[in-house]
């Protein structure tokens, strides 16, 4: 690594972290690095102000709630959606264990711009990149997921049944075959590190992950066993067990 190419010119650096979320597969593929990763859409809703039936965050089988400071609740379900593309075929067998582990993942029609079309996997530094073509990744919320949220909320929390949903949004989650992040140096490319594939865990472990990556880049001991998070687990014949546990 000698730097980063941007629209404003080159930035010198002898170490770079690829923390590009759902774009990480495409970016690393342009460097000849294979990171099995797919994007899934998650949908979330916000309710109007409501009685305080639960102060905190909780999962109630098929609905997840978090009390908000504005008096409402943030609501989500376990349902996510995947838009099939070239990478879906490329990594199909690797993601089978996660698909069979009980996760509620639906296939939906639509274009996943984070998947490079066949056969283009690379571009030169002076070409217009996919990241310039799609500068903001802001998917529309899923009508099916919103209907599930409504149904599950009314069934699990009768005190909140019929409560108005006043806002909804969606985001693309960077998922790996074992639903565990990658935090590692990239073998064969000195100075390149990767922190991605947080699979929905990033909100909780982001601060710790940032400290670990800072230690790796600076050559310090991360003081944690990072075996579970190594990039090579996808190519060294290891059995991939979905979930954060060992």
Image (tube, grey):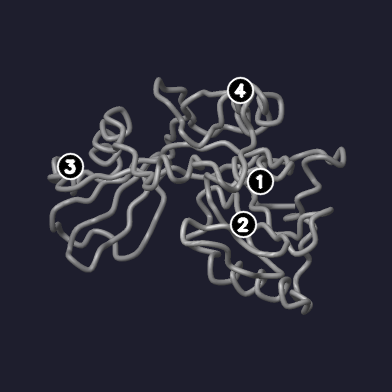
Instruction: Give the numbered dot on residue 174.
Output: none
Are the residues at dot 3 and dot 2 in contact (C-beta closer than 8 Å)? no
Classify 10 Å Cα crowding around label 4: few (below 14), some (14-19), many (20 and above). Answer: few
Q: Residue furthest right?
A: 236
For mark 2, give the secondary structure.
strand
Classify 10 Å Cα crowding around label 3: few (below 14), some (14-19), many (20 and above). Answer: some
Q: Which of marks 1 and 4 is nearer the N terminus?
A: 1
According to the picture, the residue beneath numbered tag 3 turns out to be 161
Q: From the top left corner, tell me how far across and down residue 211 is, in percent.
A: 62, 75
Q: Earlier in the sequence, mark 2 or mark 4?
A: 2
**Mark 2 vs mark 4: in front:** 4
Q: CA separation, marks 1 and 4?
A: 16 Å
According to the picture, the residue beneath numbered tag 1 turns out to be 28
Instruction: Report the number of discs.
Output: 4
Instruction: Give the numbered dot on residue 18.
Output: 2
Q: CA separation, marks 3 and 2?
A: 43 Å
| Above or below, comparing residue 9 to residue 85 in the picture | below
Q: Which of marks 4 and 3 is nearer the N terminus?
A: 4
Q: Earlier in the sequence, mark 3 or mark 1?
A: 1
**Mark 3 vs mark 1: in front:** 1
> Does residue 23 appear to the left or right of 61 in the view shown?
right
Q: CA separation, marks 2 and 1?
A: 8 Å
Classify 10 Å Cα crowding around label 2: few (below 14), some (14-19), many (20 and above). Answer: some
């Amino acid at each position: 690594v000698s730097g980063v190419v941007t629209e404003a010119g080159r930035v010198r650096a002898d170490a770079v972290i690829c923390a590009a979320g759902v774009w990480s597969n495409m970016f690393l593929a342009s460097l000849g690095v294979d990171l099995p990763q797919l994007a899934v859409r998650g949908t979330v809703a916000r309710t109007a102000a409501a009685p305080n039936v639960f102060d905190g965050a909780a999962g109630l089988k098929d609905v997840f709630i978090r009390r908000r400071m504005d008096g409402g609740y943030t609501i989500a379900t376990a349902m996510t959606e995947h838009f099939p593309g070239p990478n879906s075929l490329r990594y199909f067998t690797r993601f089978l264990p996660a698909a069979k582990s009980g996760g509620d993942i639906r296939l939906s029609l639509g274009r996943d711009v984070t998947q490079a079309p066949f056969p283009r996997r690379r571009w030169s530094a002076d070409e217009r990149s996919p990241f310039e073509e799609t500068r903001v990744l802001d998917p529309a919320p899923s009508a099916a997921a919103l209907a599930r949220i409504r149904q599950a909320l009314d069934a699990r929390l009768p005190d909140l049944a019929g409560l108005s949903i006043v806002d909804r949004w969606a985001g693309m989650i960077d998922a790996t075959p074992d639903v565990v992040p990658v935090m590692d140096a990239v073998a064969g490319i000195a100075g390149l590190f990767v922190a991605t594939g947080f699979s929905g865990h990033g909100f909780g472990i982001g601060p710790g992950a940032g400290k670990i990556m800072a230690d790796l880049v600076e050559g310090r001991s991360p003081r944690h066993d990072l075996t579970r998070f190594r990039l090579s687990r996808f190519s060294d014949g290891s059995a991939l067990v979905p979930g954060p546990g060992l």
